[in-house]
Image: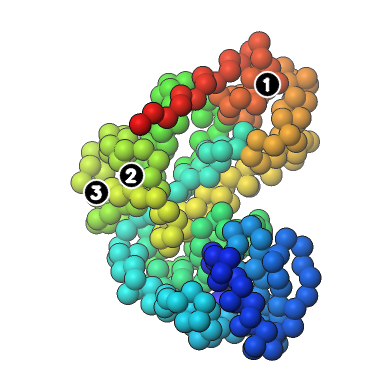
């Protein structure tokens, strides 16, 4: 294990600082941190946002098991994953997506099959939710580990912007489109692992959205949706494959067009969209972007309608 992260409360962060002082760690200033400390080849950073702890270097397992968990977190999880989450080590598919909230680029849905041996290998390799990985190089490195792990099976469906826009207009909402994409990935995985009993994904709609989109081959599989499903190793692995495909698409298409296709819906993204419209007209966006986003309306209001206002939630 070369890195480890975990959320902390403010009280836990204060207790950890005192513990590190007692253990002889040396403190130094680092941006965006409550504190940063180092001893030998182990560094401990506690970031303001969260707050959360990031451990890097050597000796992480020992520090977590003998210092952090018993003295700060007051729990024993590292090394006891099969005790706390036995279902994570049973044969199943994990499904996740990338690009859902990004104006530019495709919607990518990926799935990965794991069993006990595969899950253990993923755990040892540091497979985790892609949203916790800030480096594209790390995403690609972990994706290669997933692809080369014996027994692991992965599948990726990338819905490019042109196809995405057509399907969105057909389905009328993102949940139905997501359900269709999840179902295609499950069907593809079942071709290679027909006896897999269960598929797990993050909860985005009623499970019937996926069930209704499954073809005959997939009608018998048990579909499970839950919040924070990315804590499951199969779902985390799927999130990495999906993220890799998404960032690779942006990079390839951006280089081909000579423009940086940024992520999210930032000011820079809107400015890039504006330049594309100026150079190639509003329809140029349909080839690289999800035009139901407000960004499309903002840069070409006469061509793309504004999304409907969100209805306020009522009890």
Q: Does residue 132 sit above or below 109 in this rendering?
A: below
Look at 48% across and 78% down and name the residue there.
Answer: 69
Residue 244 lies, in percent from the top left, at 58, 51
Residue under numbered circle 3: 221
Q: Quadrant of residue 274?
A: top right
Residue 28 lies, in percent from the top left, at 78, 75
| Tag 3–tag 1 contact (CB < 8 Å) | no
Mark 3 and mark 1: span between their CA atoms?
Answer: 43 Å
Q: Quadrant of residue 231?
A: bottom left
Mark 2 and mark 3: span between their CA atoms?
Answer: 10 Å
| Tag 2–tag 1 contact (CB < 8 Å) | no
Q: Is residue 178 visible?
A: yes
Q: Nearer the viewer, mark 3 or mark 1?
A: 1
Q: Which mark is residue 63?
A: none
| Other-residue count near label 3 (Cα within 10 Å), few / some / many at <14 / 14–19 / ≥20 | some
Residue under numbered circle 1: 298
Q: Does residue 244 sit above or below 174 in this rendering?
A: below
Residue under numbered circle 2: 187
Look at 50% across and 86% down and name the residue there.
Answer: 66
Of pointers 2 and 1, the one earlier in the residue sequence: 2
Q: Does residue 24 sit above or below 184 in this rendering?
A: below
- Quadrant placement of the C terminus: top left
Secondary structure at numbered mark 1: helix
Mark 2 and mark 1: span between their CA atoms?
Answer: 38 Å
| Other-residue count near label 2 (Cα within 10 Å), few / some / many at <14 / 14–19 / ≥20 | many
Q: Nearer the viewer, mark 2 or mark 1?
A: 1
Look at 42% across and 30% down and name the residue there.
Answer: 313
Horizontal side, residue 118 vs residue 239: left or right: left
Residue 112 lies, in percent from the top left, at 41, 56
Secondary structure at numbered mark 3: loop
Secondary structure at numbered mark 2: helix
């Amino acid at each position: 294990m070369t890195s480890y992260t975990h959320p902390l409360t403010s009280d836990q962060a204060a207790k950890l600082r005192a513990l590190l002082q007692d253990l002889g760690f040396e403190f130094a200033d680092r941006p965006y941190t409550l504190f940063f400390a180092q001893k030998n080849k182990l560094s401990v950073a506690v970031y303001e946002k969260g707050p959360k702890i990031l451990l890097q270097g050597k000796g992480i397992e020992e520090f977590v098991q003998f210092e952090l968990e018993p003295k700060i977190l007051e729990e024993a999880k590292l090394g006891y994953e099969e005790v706390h989450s036995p279902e994570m080590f049973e044969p199943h598919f994990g499904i996740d997506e990338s690009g859902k909230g990004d104006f530019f680029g495709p919607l990518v849905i990926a799935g990965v099959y794991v069993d006990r041996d595969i899950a253990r290998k993923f755990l040892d390799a540091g497979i985790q939710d892609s949203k916790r990985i800030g480096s594209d190089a790390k995403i690609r490195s972990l994706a290669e580990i997933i692809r080369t792990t014996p027994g692991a099976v992965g599948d990726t469906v990338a819905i490019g912007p042109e196809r995405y826009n057509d399907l969105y207009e057909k389905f009328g909402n993102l949940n139905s489109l997501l359900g269709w994409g999840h179902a295609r990935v499950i069907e593809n995985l079942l071709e290679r692992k027909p006896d897999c009993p269960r598929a797990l994904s993050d909860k985005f709609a009623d499970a019937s959205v996926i069930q209704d989109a499954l073809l005959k081959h997939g009608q018998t599989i048990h579909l499970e949706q839950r919040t924070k499903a990315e804590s499951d190793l199969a779902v985390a692995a799927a999130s990495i494959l999906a993220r890799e495909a998404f960032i690779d698409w942006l990079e390839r298409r951006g280089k081909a067009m000579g423009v940086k296709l940024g992520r999210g819906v930032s000011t820079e993204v809107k400015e890039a969209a504006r330049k594309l419209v100026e150079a190639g007209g509003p329809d140029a966006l349909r080839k690289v972007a999800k035009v139901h986003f407000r960004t499309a309306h903002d840069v070409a209001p006469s061509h793309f309608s504004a999304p409907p206002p969100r209805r306020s939630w009522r009890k």
